[in-house]
Image (cartoon, rainbow, N blue to C red):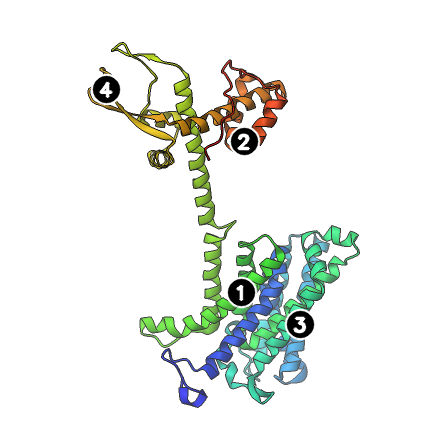
Amino acid sequence: MPGNDFGGANDFGWVWALDGWIIATGVLCAAAAALLGNFLVLRRLSLLGDAISHAVLPGLAAAFFLTGSRNSLPMFVGAVVVGVLTAFLTEWIRGAGKVDEGAAMGVVFTSLFALGLVLIVRAADHVDLDPGCVLYGAIEMTPLDTTPLAGIEVPRATIMLAIVAAIDAAFLLLFYKELKVSSFDPDLSTSLGIDARLMHYLLMTLVAVTAVASFESVGNILVVAMFVVPPAAAYLLTDRLGVMIAWSLVIAAIAAAGGHLAAVTVPTWFGLRSTTTAGMMATAAGCLFLLAAAFGPRHGVVVRFVRHRVLAWQILEDDVLALLYRIEESGPDDDPRGDRRVPTPTATELRPLLLTDPLSLRLVLARLRRLGQIDRTEENRGTYPAARHGLALTPTGRSRARNLVRSHRLWEEYLTSRAGLDAARIHDKAERFEHFTDPRLRERLDKETDAPQIDPHGKPIPTENPDPR
């Protein structure tokens, strides 16, 4: 880009008089689409934005045939009318035909899209209507079509998208409660006096307006991506609607700005000049979605895997301590040398009893040693050719283990005496409950079962100890 004509280029070849407006246009388009896209995602209508975006082609062609002009206003009106018609026809087919929402959208948008292509081909001999422009846009060219505003030359597309984004934001602010209730529970909204159908068609009208306003500058691909991807990524980051909307705006803005940066820099790494900005913005949005899907605080795949592994290791810690306590509790064994000792099992002996993998057991044992709750013993008991390294509870570990075993046996007593379960079928249930039983719950169980001393299997129920954790 020739920097001196537009205010100078930096080391990346950026011209801020051009690139700044390109980013501003992309951000406004992304924000406008993401605002409405949140409710499309919540209503499971994500593809309706795609359907409307494709179905407006006959509106563009019909506007040209009726006016004989490619002026922006008649084209805009024609496209919006067909976009709203798409929403009405989809809803009508779904209700009248009793078919799935996705099938209804497929019927409407493919039919209208095909009709639009036929009309554009028919008009191609008379005017340069280009379907590719509708798909890919020409956001790189937006800074070249400007109009004066407050003494500044501002791209027309930027002004148009700013107006549309403001209208979308105002709509959400004015009807936030109505949109929220009708999106989550249409029947409840009707009982509260909110017309869910009216909210649906108002939302669809604005979706059509936003899609059409974005065609000339950013094209179909980007606007469809921004309707769906930032809200879907935000949905993975939070369960609160207000926070979801805020996150979707942040993601949309980052995708727009980062997409343009990538479009002008990444190709240079491979010896190329640049690539389509709209496509890279959509690609950047997809990358951000993958990050949210992987590392989202509640729904991220990686986060959930780590959380599940940590929980599994915490449960394994409890199982190790409880098993060592039960082995100690089983009493002394006869030693060939005449000693009376409590056996100290090795890690190898514990693993098949705990049904765990070697790595997990090693990690858990190492952590328990760091916490000072188990210790290694070394003994040569005559029958072993070499020293035997066993595992034994420390006083701190024994205190924690006593509470775990107490929780288990109190649950067994409760399940037999209060829930009426057979004593032969309660061990697995008590095994699950013991890991999530705190001192207050043990106290309640103790009162509910009249402070028993023996569990249903004849084992003594340990007394409460201060929990070392």
**Within the image, what quadrant is residue 396 found in?**
top left
Q: Residue at x 55, y 61 (%)?
A: 247
The amino acid marked with disc number 1 is Val
Give the foreground label among 1 and 3. 1
Pick the quarter of the image with the N terminus.
Answer: bottom left
Residue lying at the far left of the rendered structure: 385
Compared to residue 221, the image places residue 13 above or below, namely: below
Helix, strand or loop at mark 1: helix
Instruction: Give the mark nearer the N terminus: 1 vs 2.
Output: 1
Residue 380's tag is 4
Compared to residue 147, the image places residue 100 above or below, namely: above
Q: Residue beneath label 3, please?
A: 167
Q: Residue 51: image x %, image y %?
A: 60, 64
Q: Nearer the viewer, residue 271 or 335?
A: 335
Q: Nearer the viewer, residue 30 or 247?
A: 247
Residue 250's tag is 1
Q: Are marks 1 and 2 in contact (CB under 8 Å)?
A: no
Q: Residue beneath label 2, please?
A: 437
**Within the image, what quadrant is residue 319 found in?**
top left
Instruction: Give the mark nearer the N terminus: 1 vs 3.
Output: 3
Q: Residue 257: image x %, image y %?
A: 48, 71
Give the foreground label among 1 and 2. 2
Q: CA distance from mark 1 to mark 2?
A: 41 Å
Residue 432's tag is none
Q: Are marks 4 and 3 in contact (CB under 8 Å)?
A: no
The amino acid marked with disc number 3 is Ile
Q: CA distance from mark 1 to mark 4?
A: 65 Å
Instruction: Give the mark nearer the N terminus: 3 vs 2.
Output: 3
Q: Are marks 1 and 4 in contact (CB under 8 Å)?
A: no
